[in-house]
Amino acid sequence: MSFFEEKNPEMDRYLEAHASSESEILKKLRRETYQKTTQPHMISGYQQGRLLTIISQMLQPKSILEIGTFTGYATLCLASGLAKDGKITTLDVNEDLAYLPKKYFESSEYASQIDFKLQDAKEFLKETDEFFDLIFVDADKENYAEYFRLIKPHTKSGTVVLFDNVLWYGKVLEESPKLKSTQSIQELNDLAAKDEDFENLILPLRDGVNFLRRK
């Protein structure tokens, strides 16, 4: 849920009304996510989807990595900007829900460019020798700092990395957080700001997106 969605829903509706419209496949996927999942709020929102789409279309990446597929909404947004010979690898561990993103991936125009893996992201990052042009992380928050460390060796100059939920409903302001998820997000944000190999900015979009670019 976004700040405006909770505190000022009228502004949230205004923001959505003044952004480019969703494709039909995204509308159907968003609707089915709310119908068939127990935590539909985990879907990348309409506004965030627009951000991912525009960034991907600007970069026209050949290789995208997504950590945390959920129902595949963000995957399709990211795939829309792929180079003609490009590929997006998307990782998740939820076998029970895998049927839903698979269905939409197979029916999309990007079917041949999406590699959906049911695999732990930490294992994947330790095993792969790939470099990525664009990386989006929206997964278990307890491992955010570790993801950052494991992702870095797979980036190159110009690689864009996006971490979702980095404001964590305001919990990042806690001085002595008890939740491991909050601690890890705080650590990630500190690492991103201090790492001289990256430049970054936290966008206050929905629940916060840490936007990094490898120098």
Image: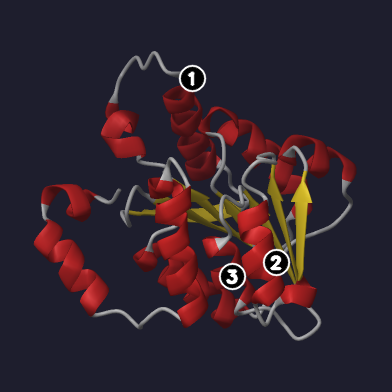
Pointer 2 residue: 133
Could you say which quadrant of the image residue 126 lies in? top right
Q: Residue at x 39, y 60 (%)?
A: 45
Crowd class of label 1 (few under 14; some 14 to 19; many from 20; radius 10 Å): few
Is mark 3 in CB contact (under 8 Å) with mark 2? no
Could you tell me how far apart the alpha carbons at marks 3 and 1 are, in whole angstroms?
30 Å
Is mark 3 in CB contact (under 8 Å) with mark 1? no
Secondary structure found at label 3: helix
Crowd class of label 3 (few under 14; some 14 to 19; many from 20; radius 10 Å): many
**x, y percent for residue 21:** 36, 82
Is residue 200 found left or right of 176 in the rendered image?
right
Could you tell me how far apart the alpha carbons at marks 3 and 2 are, in whole angstroms?
16 Å
Q: Nearer the viewer, residue 143 or 47?
A: 47
Q: Residue at x 42, y 26 (%)?
A: 182
Pointer 1 residue: 180
- Is tag 3's residue or tag 1's residue first in the polypeptide sequence? 3
Q: Nearer the viewer, mark 2 or mark 1?
A: 1
Q: Nearer the viewer, residue 94 or 126?
A: 94
Identity of the residue furthest to the front in this view: 35
Identity, as a three-letter code, of the amino acid under mark 1:
Lys
Above or below, comparing residue 9 to residue 133 in the picture: above
Q: Residue at x 52, y 76 (%)?
A: 25
Identity, as a three-letter code, of the amino acid under mark 3:
Leu
Secondary structure found at label 1: helix
Identity, as a three-letter code, of the amino acid under mark 2:
Asp
